[in-house]
Amino acid sequence: MSVGHVVSIKDLVVRAQFDDEPPRIGELVVVDNGVDTKLLVDHLEQGGIAFCLNVRSDRRIEKGMPIKTTGLGIEIPIGDPTIGRILDALGEPLDGQPSITGDNILRKDILKLPARSTEFTIAKPEILETGIKVIDFFTPFVKGRKIGIIGGAGVGKTVLTMELINNIAQSGSGLSFFTGIGERIREGHELWDTLKENDLLKNTCMFFGQMNENPVQRALIGISSVAGAEYFRDEQGKDILFFADNMYRFVQASNELSTILDQVPNEGGYEPTIFSDVKTLQDRLSSNEKGSITSVQTIYVPADDLSDPAVQMIQHELDSTIVLSRKVAEQGIRPAVDLNNTSSSLLTPDIVGDRHYMLSVRVMALLQKYESLKGIIAIIGENELSASDRADYARAKKLIDNFTQNMNVMTKHNGVPGEFYTREQTLASIEEIIV
């Protein structure tokens, strides 16, 4: 154990001087202030200076106070005792229930990467039905892959995520992880209530670092949740459904930390380490021969600008992207999916079959023609179109209506029963329109 002392304090950043061996990056150090305030070592500088982050925003730290190393990182409880619980970035409960402690409780350092396997096998793609037409058709939900739900504020990202959790959890397949990163506290409560009412907590682990938390906890909560999911994947061989709301807030929290650490931003205005920050988290959302992690990530789009550098960075890590549009939402269409901008690299004959693939090609062609015809109709009117163009325009309108769907999780708010469609029902409904 090494002992140092506090040199300076600036907001959440505490500089500590260690004359002996300094702590390692990612280690927890403890301030000897009577309450043992924990700090996380972010980086080291020459001369035994450690830059530490005040994880709990504890203000009971003064210059000159002794600091002791622990030799430990942030260790959270893992395994079955975490199922049905809500934990924070340090593994402490947020649900009013007792802490997960005891000699038989397994713990894991969240920053320690799992061992890499040298074995490599190509598993046959397995499609998971979500019951949501627009997702099952345009962005098939394939086990072990990543789907992003992209959109600005208030267009339905969280509702769509909650519907996915509800529909997939009802089937009882696998274990669900939900990670709330910098989102509204109200949404966390609503999700908790929904899962409890439907008796789904028995298959769900929840990690929250919501809007009220400091940027240290919001930047760490995704890593903590992934660490918990890795245990179930690697040690119990489970298939994990990992929901993260909102991945942009993870970048935002990392950017706030970068600012208080006085780092120079990159050209896009974000932290200089944005690429490694995103890659570190995304690379851990992977599958191996023991189990799989299938992730659904919502991505907030600042000012509805899809070209934002952070949004683009996260998008590059995804297999499928569902784009939610404010223009579509204003037309009363739910879910408010922009069908022309939504895309998936998984929509291939090898994965979805020839029937589904050929239908998707025809549907996309009709929707693109619909967009081009809208401008012409605004000038000359629909009656001036040729007969074939009028027929295609009418089919496209029917398709858009067909992808509109009532959500089960909204039933208690609007009284309208939710709908669930199998992939076969979805394909059949499209064939009725275009064949």
Image (cartoon, grey):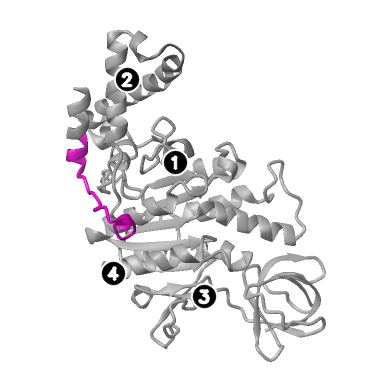
Query: Looking at the rendering, which quadrant does residue 429 occupy?
Result: top left
Q: Find disc 1 in the rendering and name its residue.
A: 324
Question: What's the amino acid at mark 2?
Answer: Tyr
Per the image, the residue denoted by label 4 is 197
Q: Nearer the viewer, mark 2 or mark 4?
A: 2
User: In the image, which is nearer the foreground, mark 2 or mark 1?
Assistant: 2
Residue 360 shows up from this direction: no
Residue 349 appears left or right of 284: left
- Verify whether residue 421 appears in magenta: yes
The x and y percentages for residue 352 are: 25, 36
| Residue at the disc numbered 3 | 75
Say what amino acid the circle numbered 4 marks.
Answer: Glu
> Which residue sits at x=21%, y=41%?
423
Percent position of residue 320, x then y: 40, 40
Spatial CA span between label 1 and label 4: 28 Å
Above or below, comparing residue 63 to residue 216 in the picture: below
Disc 2 versus disc 1: distance between alpha carbons? 22 Å
Which image quarter holds the N terminus? Answer: bottom right
Disc 3, SS: strand
Q: Earlier in the sequence, mark 4 or mark 3?
A: 3
Q: Which residue is mark 2?
A: 393
Task: Give the number of the disc on residue 383.
Answer: none
Q: Magenta stretch?
A: 409-427
Label 4: few (<14), some (14–19) or many (≥20) C-alpha neighbours in 10 Å: few
